[in-house]
Image (tube, helix red, strand yellow):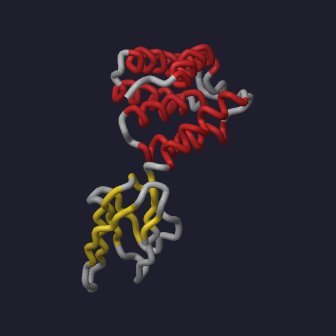
Amino acid sequence: MTLNRFASTVLCAALLVAPALCRAQSAEDRAAAHTEFEHGVAAYTARDYQTALDAFQEAYRLAPHPSVRLNIANCYDQLDRPVEALFHFEHYLSEATGLTAAQRHDVEASIDRLEARVGTIALAVSPDGAAITIDGTDTRRAPVSDPIRVRAGDHVVDIALDGYVSEHQTVHVEGGGSAR
């Protein structure tokens, strides 16, 4: 994957705002966030996206700022994790202020591109309290009222509750679609 024009612009622009990260934090947290942010920019520039992601996440934990969230989204995108990238791009748009029309357009284009690679699984499970596991890692308890975003493709859904017969299904989800 290549670094898109918007991602490189955001990394540079965000570096300029990094010292102003969340003024409600302590001076030590802001300084540590700035250091982590700079580390993330260097790693991203070197195409070490996992290291960049780790650094940006720590910077965001220390001093949340929409520009850092955008860099997190770009890392997830580069790491081919469209569900997480989509989540952070969407939250960036809801949190960021003062975006130009071009910036908003670029982020919305990223969202549109990612939505084509992501679908949802809608669950109707009873009884309440049943454990629902998707792909062996994402576990929730019934009832689950909101559809769950997943990468397009096949997913294994396991449903279990003591005293009941367990269910095991493979569900295919189309990009931009939904499975039940």
Vertical placement of residue 112 versus 18, above or below: below
In the rendered image, which quarter contains the N terminus?
A: top left
Q: Residue at x 52, y 24 (%)?
A: 7
Vertical placement of residue 178 versus 60, above or below: below
| Relative side of 167 to 83, left or right | left
Q: Residue at x 47, y 15 (%)?
A: 38
Q: Residue at x 43, y 36 (%)?
A: 77
Q: Residue at x 31, y 61 (%)?
A: 155
Rendered location of residue 132, percent (x, y): 35, 69
Rendered location of residue 129, percent (x, y): 40, 76
| Relative side of 119 to 64, left or right | left
Quadrant for residue 44, please give it: top left
Vertical placement of residue 44 versus 80, above or below: above
Q: How many marks?
A: 0
Vertical placement of residue 90 versus 29, above or below: below
Closest to the observer: 169 or 113? Answer: 113
Residue 27 visible? The answer is no
Residue 110 visible? The answer is yes
In the rendered image, which quarter contains the C terminus?
A: bottom left
Quadrant for residue 110, please give it: top right
Closest to the observer: 121 or 42? Answer: 121
Quadrant for residue 172, please give it: bottom left
Rendered location of residue 35, percent (x, y): 47, 16
Rendered location of residue 133, percent (x, y): 32, 65
Closest to the observer: 176 or 78? Answer: 176
